[in-house]
Image (cartoon, rainbow, N blue to C red):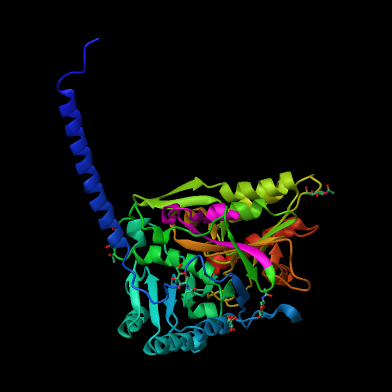
Amino acid sequence: MAGPAPQEPVKSQQKCIANFALLCCLAVLVALIFSSVNIWEDVEEDITEDNCSRDCRIELVENIPEHLSFHADGSPRFPLSAGFHALLDQARYSVEMVSPVWDLNAWDVEAKQGQLLFQRLLRLVSRGVKLKIVSSLTNSAELKTLAEHNAEVHFINMTALTRGGLHSSFWIVDRKHIYIGSAGMDWRSLFKRKELGVMVFNCSCLALDLHRVFLFYWQLHDKDYIPSIWSKRVTALYGRHDGLEMQLNSSQAVAYVSTSPERFCPKYRTKDLDAIHQVIQSAKTFIFISVTDYLPLLSWPYRGTTVTRYWSPIDEMIREAAVLRGVRVRLLISFWRRTHPLTFNFVTSLRSLCTQLINCSIEVKFFGHKEHSDDLQHGLNHNKYMVTDNAVYIGNHNWVGIDFALSAGVGLVVKMKNSVAEGEVTIVEHVRAAFERDWRSPYSKSLHGNRDGHGKFRNLNQMYTEIHEGK
Ligand SMILES: *[C@@H]1O[C@H](CO)[C@@H](O)[C@H](O)[C@H]1NC(C)=O
Ligand SMILES: *[C@@H]1O[C@H](CO)[C@@H](O)[C@H](O)[C@H]1NC(C)=O
Ligand SMILES: *[C@@H]1O[C@H](CO)[C@@H](O)[C@H](O)[C@H]1NC(C)=O
Ligand SMILES: *[C@@H]1O[C@H](CO)[C@@H](O)[C@H](O)[C@H]1NC(C)=O
Ligand SMILES: *[C@@H]1O[C@H](CO)[C@@H](O)[C@H](O)[C@H]1NC(C)=O
């Protein structure tokens, strides 16, 4: 029953002072962090998420190499290079770009489209449009030239940050129009590689959100660590639980931007893998996937050797959709010199899952062609997307564990609402048509044929060996 000890008030006073000091320190620290993270002088700040535009126009853009011939209706509705120029036509104030590669200006007769685009960018900056670029390249002559012409280039050291690569490929023009897709600033993307992406015009809501991803990269300039506290200005505006409700042409849709790796996802930002999960889960009748590489493995260099682990998330999602929900799955994978040999084993395993099951279908085809096999990139299907009966996911990564785990990339999810306008062909249908064109083309070959399955399988392996050993 003793009363309070006499020292106690003094103690609590000390505690109070200590707490106060701690709070002050914290406040100063937070202020410091925020100020270091918040440098962004701006002209287009007057559009906010409250009054941005959600009445947008979307365009599917593709590059189809000239020497690939598809059936009559196979030509792209909107060629990629025309799309890039259309986007730059809109630029009045700013162009923000991220690309894994800068190789537009090569001295190659085939690089004409690339050179034109590069000249276009130079003219743009000389006209006073701000050009901001984020890159992980230290030694790019093109970036140096652009910087000499007043482009601002920020370097991010992916090796120091995640040990991955920068695969992100997107543009934001005037904080109103965007591009996301498989093509980077590489003349090959405009000439000899098969690419697919989308441009969304008049869409400041989506552009504001993608700009926040850009801002995240921008502030990693020359840093060798990822700050653990971020300014609110990089917080995601939309995500898988609260996508942007918008109008795409005349149809109602929901969209959001996802990113990877996980450490590049600030508050509320949906991870690429979760976006893919959501799109697969909401598919009702089919899932069509077109990627350069598909491999449920995670390998990384460690002390001079390579450590490899099984990486199952996407494989699991596909298995569940096909076996438990009866959703038809088609995988179109590129067949090229860098195709990992185990790819064939893993997709064979996927396919065999449907053995003796009615209402289960997993089909796999390899896209490739033999001519010019001395050139790795020639005619390569560089696409990285998935389309289902109600949504598309267009990303920057191959579906390989290490990409999602360590490398930077973005994805765009567009899900159509039920009320599609009368007579309107939606972006989902356009992407589906592009997929089916590729799937039915002579360049896509099944792993097993109809009856003489073994023969075809061997042929594919032979072809694989030829390409790998023959150079
Ligand atoms: C949008 O809202 C912001 C702040 O709420 C305001 O400053 C700005 O003028 C508005 N812009 C337009 C175009 O209405
Ligand atoms: C990037 O980071 C790595 C690892 O910290 C370092 O060795 C390398 O020098 C850095 N590169 C540049 C260009 O700063
Ligand atoms: C964007 O909207 C404006 C005004 O609503 C319109 O004049 C313009 O043509 C649109 N731009 C594109 C590329 O659709
Ligand atoms: C196949 O699965 C779908 C989705 O569960 C279902 O709607 C359909 O009726 C099934 N068809 C057959 C033939 O079982
Ligand atoms: C949206 O409308 C534009 C014309 O305004 C058209 O070029 C484009 O192909 C349309 N997009 C889709 C997905 O139909």
Task: Please state which of residues 295 and 335 is positioned toward the viewer in this rendering.
Answer: 295
Q: Tell me, yes or no, whether the highlighted magenta stretch contains residue 181.
A: no
Tell me which residue sits at (51%, 78%) in the image.
188
Q: Quarter-wise, where is residue 443 in the image?
A: bottom right
Left/right placement of residue 34 relative to residue 402 reads left
Seen in the picture, residue 413 relative to 118 is either above or below; the reply is above
Residue occupying the point 47% across, 74% down: 175
Residue 260 among those drawn in magenta: yes
- Considering every residue shown, the one lying at the far top of the view is 1
For image coordinates 15% across by 23% down, the residue present is: 7
Residue 45, horizontal then vertical, whole percent: 41, 72
Quarter of the image where the N terminus is located:
top left
Q: Which residues are magenta?
A: 252-276
- Please provide percent x and percent y for residue 36: 28, 61
Which is more toward the observer, 47 or 124?
Answer: 47
The percent coordinates of residue 25 (x first, y second) are: 21, 47
Res 467 seen here: yes
